[in-house]
């Protein structure tokens, strides 16, 4: 029973339901209390002990149904169990196949599966291997020999035919079972592998089919960042004594200062203005940058975003009203794919929005600084730099390419407080983390 | 838990029936939660939209188990002085002042500083006793000799610091008070935490609790609830009203009508002597269960369709 239970828990973890050790113990106790006979009751109780958000509850129900489907099938046939020993030899299997005793076959299959350790399956490439192993454990060679023998005689006729069909049926069953195990147990590992790859590969090189996956990772990263940084810590019990409040608090004690009050400082989250290049040269990366901006909107309460190529517009509204993909589409439609003109865009920004940049603002610019040989108007960037708290430039190109060709990075460089290469999700994550941390420290 | 209380929690069915007698109709999940929590002695974190009876659940549990209910309403800035205990310095000071003469008597014949100190030391406990401790809800719940139902309401409104502070109480059922030492619960209280999900609770807190999600009830359950709360409601009206409310919940509204609001609405309709839902009457009473002008307008557009559908639902049953 415990083995089944641990398998169940690892399947849950595969479905991204976090289960701690303490919760495992709770769940065991709960299961013991509820007993195994009342399926719905067990489901309700375990779901309370293990799944702790509405999303996790949905996932839990799915896994529970999938996982215990086979178990219940097994239980129903309890009375008809004919065979006890796990190591069925060819003869028994033959007899079972001929008799068409499916319940006994299912039981034998499960036992064989435990014997060869199917729960260790991780990758879909292992399907064939495990199917074969289970079949061998059940003693399929004997059956094959029998089929061969019958075929050899030439007059196998209908009996041989029937046996062959039964064997094919058995093969189907075993493969299904192995696949079910794979979907339960393997999901976790392959998921991790894929995520790791996506996080490290260049944003521009990603396939269209990875997009959905990517979106989920971006969401995950952002959620983690929210969890890390959404706390507004109060600096308490340190720093300066707040005389006024200390006096007031201690009126009741006859003016004897028993309780001290300290000056408190509340730390606020940073104000951010993000400016994103969506021109043709960075189009492949732009989508993901926009995606990230979108998620950032959830993370930071005070953020405004702008997009530009030949000219610059504010896009905060799009992010507020639409879901991620639509928002990115709309922005791309409006200003995307045009030739870049940094000078013009900076001029636009200066005219319409520079007034809103103040000492608490962090400006983030996402772009490759390739301005098609137009006037880069670096002096406007200088102006921004002087007004804002920090100016961060994230460039999707690797540093050796900065300043080559029509790249104006070198002219912009002096005015950036922080200049980073940024073309994978890992880079993005690091930058945002930096941004939030320093913002907290500096506030 | 006394044997008596354990007997009341002997099976899930029993819990359901007992609660129903007290006018609280619980779904199977809720009954299971009470059953498991009662037997394992774990706190229950109840989440769900506003007005589905999360607080009422704790009230009913207290009544069912015959325990006092101790309630702690959370809000931003709630700290341990208000939640756990406060040391009454002023009282302590005052007592010391008044008892100064008596101190003279105690120390009367003592010779020298050391002897006086020793004598005083024998009475030290007088100055640091529970007399000067003003217990707040959490401490009260721990010290209740027969156990208690502790309701920590809207825990999502409290600060992160307070959430962390709750951890010791929730897992060990004890608190540390610097002046007195550790106070342990004589009998474990039954703890409910409610949350409206205005922010995500920390993993550490969730790990220590059973998690119960209470959604809006489905139609049959809601009918039962209304029947239990307003027994005199006509059968027709009950069916139609529930069907109407369920349809309204399908819309995208700023605030969905809760169970308590549909009960209020039923009361209002009863007061107006309605036997059936009529579109006009519904329009006039929409503000009973919809609290935003935009919501009222969007429901108003669907009014006739909904009323017809509600009557049909009733017809299909008959």
Image (cartoon, grey):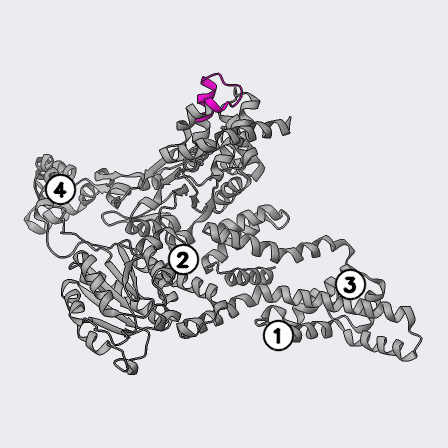
* Marks 2 and 3 close (CB-CB < 8 Å): no
Residue named by callout 2: A324
Q: What stretch is highlighted in magenta?
A: B265-280
| Dot 1 or dot 3, earlier in sequence | 3
Which secondary structure lies at badge 4? Answer: helix
Label 3 chain ID: A
Q: Is residue B169 left or right of residue B40?
A: left
| Dot 2 or dot 4, earlier in sequence | 4
Residue named by callout 1: A126
Q: In this view, does A176 lie to the left or right of A341?
A: right
Circle 1 packing at 10 Å, graded few (<14), some (14-19), many (20+), is few
Do callouts 2 and 1 point to residues on the same chain?
yes
Check the picture and name the quadrant holding the N terminus of chain A: bottom right
| Dot 2 or dot 3, earlier in sequence | 3
Q: Which of A270 and A312 is in front in this view?
A: A312
* Marks 4 and 3 close (CB-CB < 8 Å): no
Q: Can residue A383 be seen in this view?
A: yes
Circle 3 packing at 10 Å, graded few (<14), some (14-19), many (20+), is few
Q: Distance between the residues labelled 1 and 3?
A: 29 Å
Q: Distance between the residues labelled 2 and 4?
A: 50 Å
* Marks 1 and 3 close (CB-CB < 8 Å): no
| Dot 4 or dot 1, earlier in sequence | 1
Q: In this view, does B175 lie to the left or right of A21?
A: left
Residue named by callout 4: A249
């Amino acid at each position: 029973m415990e083995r089944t239970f641990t398998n169940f828990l690892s399947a849950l973890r595969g479905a991204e339901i976090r289960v701690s050790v303490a919760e495992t113990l709770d769940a065991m106790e709960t299961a013991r209390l509820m007993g195994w006979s009342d399926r719905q009751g067990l489901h309700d109780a375990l779901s309370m002990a293990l799944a702790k958000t509405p999303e996790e509850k949905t996932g839990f129900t799915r896994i529970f149904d999938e996982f215990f489907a086979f178990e219940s099938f097994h239980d129903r046939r309890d009375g008809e169990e004919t065979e006890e020993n796990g190591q069925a030899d060819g003869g028994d299997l033959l007899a079972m196949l001929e008799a068409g005793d499916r319940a006994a076959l299912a039981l034998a299959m499960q036992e064989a599966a435990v014997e060869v350790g199917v729960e260790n399956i991780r990758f879909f490439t292992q399907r064939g291997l495990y199917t074969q192993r289970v079949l061998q454990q059940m003693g399929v060679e004997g059956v094959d020999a029998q089929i061969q023998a019958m075929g050899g005689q030439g007059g196998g006729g209908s009996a041989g035919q029937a046996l062959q069909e039964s064997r094919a049926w058995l093969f189907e069953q075993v493969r299904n079972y192995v696949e079910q195990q794979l979907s339960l147990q393997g999901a976790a590992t392959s998921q991790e592998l894929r995520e790791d790859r996506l996080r490290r590969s260049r944003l521009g090189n990603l396939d269209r089919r990875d997009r959905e996956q990517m979106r989920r990772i971006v969401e995950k990263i952002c959620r983690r960042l929210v969890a890390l940084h959404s706390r507004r810590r109060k600096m308490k019990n340190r720093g300066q004594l707040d005389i006024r409040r200390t006096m007031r608090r201690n009126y009741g004690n006859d003016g004897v200062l028993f309780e001290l009050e300290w000056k408190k400082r509340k730390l606020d989250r940073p104000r951010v203005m993000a400016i994103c290049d969506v021109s043709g040269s960075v189009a492949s990366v732009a989508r993901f940058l926009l995606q990230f901006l979108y998620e950032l909107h959830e993370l930071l309460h005070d953020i405004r975003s702008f997009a530009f190529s030949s000219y610059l517009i504010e896009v905060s509204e799009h992010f507020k009203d639409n879901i991620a993909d639509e928002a990115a589409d709309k922005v791309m439609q409006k200003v995307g794919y045009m030739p870049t003109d940094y000078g013009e865009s900076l001029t636009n920004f200066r005219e319409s929005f520079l007034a809103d940049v103040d000492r608490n603002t962090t400006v983030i610019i996402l772009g490759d600084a390739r301005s098609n040989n137009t006037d880069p108007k670096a002096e406007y960037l200088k102006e921004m730099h002087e007004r804002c708290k920090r100016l961060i430039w994230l460039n999707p190109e690797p540093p050796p390419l900065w300043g080559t060709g029509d790249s104006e990075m070198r002219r912009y460089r002096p005015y950036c407080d922080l200049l980073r290469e940024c073309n994978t999700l890992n880079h993005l994550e690091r930058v945002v983390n930096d941004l939030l941390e320093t913002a907290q420290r500096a506030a | 838990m006394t044997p008596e209380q354990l007997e009341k929690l002997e099976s899930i069915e029993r819990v359901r029936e007992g609660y129903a007698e007290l006018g609280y109709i619980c779904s199977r999940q809720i009954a299971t939660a009470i059953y498991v929590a009662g037997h394992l002695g774990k706190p229950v974190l109840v989440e769900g939209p506003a007005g589905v009876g999360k607080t009422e659940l704790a009230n009913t549990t207290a009544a069912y188990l015959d325990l006092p209910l101790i309630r702690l309403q959370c809000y931003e800035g709630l700290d341990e002085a208000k939640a756990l205990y406060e040391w009454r310095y002023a009282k302590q000071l005052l007592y010391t002042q008044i008892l100064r003469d008596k101190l003279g008597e105690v120390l009367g014949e003592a010779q020298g500083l050391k002897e006086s100190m020793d004598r005083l030391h024998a009475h030290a406990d007088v100055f640091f006793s529970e007399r000067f401790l003003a217990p707040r809800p959490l401490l009260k719940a721990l010290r209740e000799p027969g156990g208690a139902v502790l309701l920590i309401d809207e825990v999502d409104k409290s600060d992160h610091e307070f959430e962390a502070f709750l951890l010791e109480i929730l897992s060990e059922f004890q608190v540390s008070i610097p002046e007195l030492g550790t106070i342990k619960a004589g009998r474990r209280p039954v703890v409910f935490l409610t949350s409206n999900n205005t922010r995500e609770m920390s993993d550490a807190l969730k790990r220590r609790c059973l998690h119960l999600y209470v959604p809006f009830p489905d139609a049959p359950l809601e009918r039962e609830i209304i029947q239990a709360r307003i027994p005199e409601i006509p059968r027709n009206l009950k069916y139609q009203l529930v069907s109407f409310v369920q349809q309204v919940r399908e819309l995208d509204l700023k605030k969905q009508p809760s169970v308590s609001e549909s009960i209020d609405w039923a009361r209002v309709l009863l007061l107006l002597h309605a036997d059936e839902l009529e579109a006009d009457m519904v329009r006039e009473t929409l503000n009973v269960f919809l609290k935003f002008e935009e919501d009222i307008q969007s429901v108003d557009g669907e009014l006739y369709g909904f009323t017809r559908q509600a009557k049909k639902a009733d017809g299909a049953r008959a």
